[in-house]
Image (cartoon, rainbow, N blue to C red):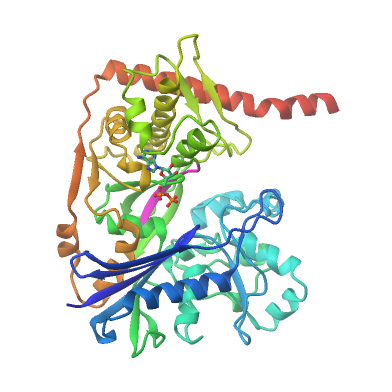
Amino acid sequence: MPYLLALDQGTTSCRALLFDKKGGVRAVAQEEFGQHYPQPGWVEHDAAEIRDLQLRLARQVVKGVDQGEIAAIGITNQRETTVVWDRQTGEPIHNAIVWQDRRTTGICARLVADGLENHIHTTTGLRADPYFSATKIAWLLENVDGARERAERGDLAFGTIDTWLLWNLTDRAVHATDVTNASRTMLYDIRLGQWDDTMLEALNIPRSLLPDVRPSSGLFGETSLFGGSIPIMGIAGDQQAALFGQACFEPGMAKNTYGTGCFMLLNTGSEPVQSENGLLTTIAWDLGEGPVYALEGSVFIAGAAIQWLRDEMGLLENAAESEQIATSVESTDGVYVVPAFVGLGAPYWEPNARGAVFGLTRGSTRAHLVRATLESIAYRTRDVLDAMTADADLSLASLRVDGGAALNNFLMQFQADILNVPVERPASVETTAWGAAGLAGLAAGLFDLEVLAELREVDAEFEPEMDAETRNELYDGWRQAVGTVMIHSSKPQRKRSEAVR
Ligand code: ADP
């Protein structure tokens, strides 16, 4: 039986999984690593720690398996997180700057002041936001002693985590990334398929720093770190890997991942769709026949709101309990929770928004609050899906879901009701890692797309049951609540500027 080794390098943990070619998990190892917060709004990882941990976990799951039985390796990774290292010593010049890190807000403001906002949107598909890698690289070159000179001499290399792992796995022979990761740097022209000179010049980033960009499925290199020689044949960023793992191969198919945040991706086929409604345009994958594009809606707080109920509010013992508490009442009785704890992402992009609760009465209970918080996750998803259907001019046949909070049956039923779209939950929850394994297995010739689509098993299907009037009424209430949060978010600034005047 040939196996596929998936390396799943996430934001809080590294995982290694050994799959058989039908998607069955033969072995899995997972461990968390250090999170560093040197200042408010800054988030860093030790890239050397990630490398060592990821390799150790991989060795753990391949133990006892003849390396000849491992057909290929697939890598999936937290996206945008930025590593710059010395090509000679192999060591990072600084901690990795994580996607959540907001330190480059000022550099983004500079890009906007330079009139680059529209260029960024049309060329890279993204927005001038610290979320992406480009300004993180610029920050490292500007702030690490000697980095600028070393970069000019060609001594340094940049990579997202996939690139950093690949370089180490191949004993420093291969400095490459795949198109999905490149499309999150804010340096990559997603239409022409090349690094963009305008962005490189604007941020003063030497080209010598950048990796080769390759299709997501195909031979990247070989590793001998697990004995013998095993080809690395698949790479994709985590959300794209989940889209692939969910077999959303056709245009018009979408998946939503309910983890800490919610990330919805819609396959839009071989043509990029430029969003007029606050979404990102990104590359879904390239199987060697040119890029397939996706629209993406990123919601920063989803399952994290349930953690907040549990840890800060003390309303829950554990996340799973939220289901039974929510269903102990018939409705929220008009209560809305808007969990805009770190601002609002797609499609609003209001970094100054903060959370709020609306509609409290003397009779409001814990159950109403818990239910309203779960419902807010479904409403945020509707916000994003409405933007997607407007941009792509389509109606969704079904939504494929995954992530920890997708296990909540109440949430999934309410999601189907509020979208008026059926929700499909797969039997295997390992969609991200399986996506990476799938890209590798495809290149290794273990299966084709048709077989991959057939391997997918549905665990539960949630059909919309709510009548249109109730749906519209509930969603109108949500829009009002969000509208109020948006107005409130700009108030302190208005006051400040009035005071100055
Ligand atoms: P991540 O990969 O972002 O860490 P996971 O996919 O592991 O996230 O999902 C964990 C998140 O899902 C947590 O925020 C948790 O609060 C939430 N969660 C887990 N189980 C449930 C549940 N049964 N109902 C609602 N939320 C849940």
The residue at 34%/56% (across/down) is 242
* Residue 264 appears left or right of 98: left
Task: Work out whether residue 250 or residue 458 is closer to the camera in this orientation and state it.
Answer: 458
The residue at 45%/10% (across/down) is 363
* Residue 443 appears left or right of 184: left
Task: Work out whether residue 344 or residue 397 is closer to the camera in this orientation and state it.
Answer: 344
Look at the image and tell me in which quarter the N terminus lies.
Answer: bottom left
Q: Position of residue 438 (x, y in %)?
A: 27, 67
Task: Work out whether residue 345 or residue 396 is closer to the camera in this orientation and state it.
Answer: 345
Q: Quadrant of residue 223?
A: bottom left
Q: Residue 396, relative to residue 444: is it above or below?
A: above
Q: Position of residue 202 (x, y in %)?
A: 67, 62
Q: Position of residue 235 (x, y in %)?
A: 38, 69
- Residue most toward the top? 362
Q: Is residue 293 magenta?
A: yes
Q: Quadrant of residue 8?
A: bottom left
Q: Position of residue 88 (x, y in %)?
A: 62, 87
- Residue most toward the bottom? 228
- Residue most toward the right? 500
Q: Is residue 340 among the parts visible in the rendering?
A: yes
Magenta-highlighted stretch: main secondary structure? Answer: strand
Q: Is residue 501 among the parts visible in the rendering?
A: no
Q: Is residue 375 magenta?
A: no
Q: Residue 233, relative to residue 284: is it above or below?
A: below
* Residue 390 appears left or right of 174: left
* Residue 45 appears left or right of 300: right
Where's ligand 1: which quadrant?
top left
The residue at 48%/41% (across/down) is 304
The span picked out in magenta is: 292-300
Q: Residue 188, relative to residue 116: is it above or below?
A: below
